[in-house]
Image (cartoon, coloured by chain):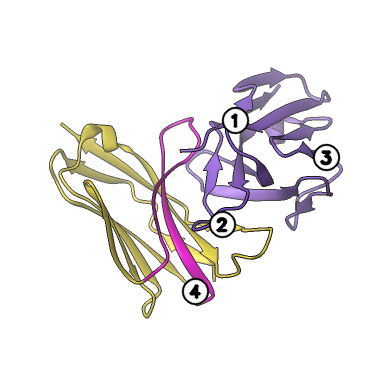
Chain colours: A purple, B yellow
Amino acid sequence: GAVVSQHPSRVICKSGTSVKIECRSLDFQATTMFWYRQFPKQSLMLMATSNEGSKATYEQGVEKDKFLINHASLTLSTLTVTSAHPEDSSFYICSARERHLSSTDTQYFGPGTRLTVL
Amino acid sequence: QKEVEQDPGPLSVPEGAIVSLNCTYSNSAFQYFMWYRQYSRKGPELLMYTYSSGNKEDGRFTAQVDKSSKYISLFIRDSQPSDSATYLCAILRGDRGSTLGRLYFGRGTQLTVWP
């Protein structure tokens, strides 16, 4: 199957700092990438949908100025958590939708990034 | 009402048991159905994908869809300790031409298979 990577896998930062998370599709082009967050024992919560070359579409309740998303190429999307606070601590997961699929609309998920804000 | 409902469990079974995982959904516009497996502290991996009512089999896994009841299931035969994970159902709307392709996830069912 297609491979999606995330970097870093784990980050610990001080309150007030900004953290950037990268999501890459390694062996396919992704016109659309999705960013989720997941709390312990909870399901994935969609934060935003990112289309290459355009502004991200944020879900209701997600602050676009706090969670900056850039999708500059067909293989890379970044999520920047600005002025992070302890309540932003979570597991952030990206997924990528393969371009020109003929039979499926499958999303491939990255391994996730665990963010801890002290 | 949530778009997708899934019993979070936890579910604990002995090795070799048949496991049944289920989800219900509310919107008949949903036409594509997936099951993902997520190990602790990892991203979800796609297990099964189907778009029609009926059964789809892949090794020990069978995905079943009943669109008339808006009910989907995943069966695991001869369950193994390595199957211990959280299983998430996910559903996609029928507008495949959309560039959004948003998935709606269930809460996930935590499964433990003990030796």
* Mark in front: 2 vs 4: 2
User: Pointers 4 and 3 in contact (CB under 8 A)?
Assistant: no
Check residue A66 in the rendering and tell me which mark sits there, or answer none.
Answer: 3
Q: CA distance from mark 2 to mark 1?
A: 21 Å
Residue named by callout 1: A26
What secondary structure is found at the residue carrying circle 4? loop
Q: CA distance from mark 4 to mark 3?
A: 32 Å
**Residue numbers of the magenta segment:** B29-52
* Residue nearer the viewer, B39 or A97: A97
Instruction: Mark 4: give few (<14), some (14-19) or many (20+) Cα within 10 Å.
Output: some
In the rendered structure, which amino acid carries the disc numbered 2?
Leu
Distance from Cα at disc 2 to Cα at disc 4 = 14 Å
Q: Secondary structure at mark 1?
A: loop
The CA distance from mark 2 to mark 3 is 23 Å
Quadrant placement of the C terminus of chain A: top right
Label count reads 4
Q: Which mark is residue B103?
A: 2
The location of residue A50, given as percent across then percent down, is: 74, 47
Same chain under badges 2 and 1? The reply is: no
How far separated are the C-alphas under marks 1 and 3?
27 Å
